[in-house]
Amino acid sequence: MIKILVAEDQAMVLGALVALLEIESDFEVRATALNGEIAFKLLKEQAIDIVLTDIEMPKMSGLDLAIKIKEHHIKTRVIILTTFSRPGFLRRALDAGVTGYLLKDSPSEKLANAIRTVHSGGRSIDPELALEAWTDNNPLTDNERLTLKLAGEGMTSKEISKQIHLAEGTVRNYLSEAISKLDANNRIDAYRIARQKGWL
C-alpha cells in the first residue's frame, strides 16, 4: 500500500481528494492536514510515502513544507497539486526536491498514475509547464526576492532591515534592483509582477 498524506486548506477539496484517492486499491490516506505546519508535524510522527500538497496554505505553504522535508531528510516524496500554472512556482518546487507537479484540472487517472510513478522513484511533471519553466527565468536573487516579498506585504525598508538584519540602505538597494529587473514602476508594481510569475 502507498501511504499518503494530503495537505489542502479547503475542507471540501480535501474531502473530495481523500474520497478520490481511496477508490484506488493500492492507496491508503494515512493523514490529512489543513496547512503545512500540521502536515510537517504529522510527517515527524509517522511514515508516509507520498505527501500530496497544495501550494498556498496558511501558516506554511506547500513549497515551504517541501523545503522543510528536504532539510530534515524525511523519507517521503512530495507531489504538488495546484491551480497555479506559473512556471516560477514549478522552478521553486523542483529546487525544493518536489518530484511531482500537477494542476488541479488534471484528470483523476493522471493523479493516480503520478502517485504511482513518484512512489516508484520517478517524476511526474506537467510537460507543458516544465517546458515553460525552463524558458522563463527568474532574474531576482534570493535577497531581492525576500525584500520584495516583505515590501509587498506592507513592510517599510526600516522594518525589513530589522527583520532580516541588513542595513536599511542595503534593503533599498535590493528593492531598487528588483524594480529595475522587472521593469516595474515601484516596489508594489514589482511585487505584483513577481507574484504573477510565481517568483515569490
Image (spheres, rainbow, N blue to C red):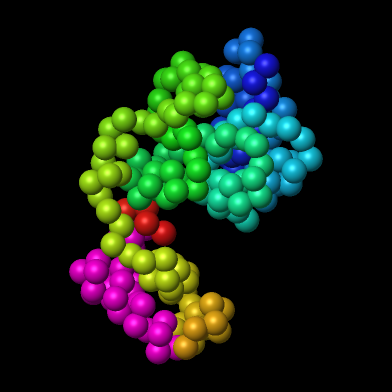
Residue sitting at x 44%, y 84%: 157
Q: Is residue 192 left or right of residue 6?
A: left
Residue 61 rendering spot, x and y as whole percentages: 55, 51
Q: Is residue 97 visible?
A: yes
Q: Can residue 15 be seen in this view?
A: no
Question: From the viewer's perspective, is 180 left or right of 155?
Answer: left
Q: Whole-percent x and y of residue 176?
A: 30, 79
Quarter residue 5 falls in? top right
Q: Specify whether 155 is left or right of 196.
A: right
Q: Look at the magenta stretch and give its main secondary structure.
A: helix
Q: In the image, is residue 188 part of the stretch drawn in magenta?
A: yes
From the viewer's perspective, is 73 left or right of 173? right
Q: Which residue lies furthest to the left in this view?
A: 183
Question: Height in image: 69 above or below 46?
Answer: below
Name the residue rendered at 63%, 35% in the picture: 76
Q: In which quarter of the image is residue 105?
A: top left
How far across and down, in percent of the image, does residue 39 sit? 67, 43
Q: Of all residues shown, which one is farthest toward the top?
A: 25
- The quarter of the picture where the N terminus appears is top right
Quadrant of the image occupied by residue 86: top left
Q: Residue at x 72, y 27 (%)?
A: 30
Q: Nearer the viewer, residue 42 or 9?
A: 42
Residue 166: image location, x then y, percent: 49, 83
Q: Residue at coordinates 42% horizontally, 66% vertically from top-left?
A: 142
Q: Count all numbered tags in the image, as a single digit.
A: 0
Compare residues 177 and 60 and report the one nearer the observer.
177
Q: Is residue 66 above or below residue 77?
A: below
In the picture, the quarter occupied by the C terminus is: bottom left
- Give the magenta part as a residue range: 168-196
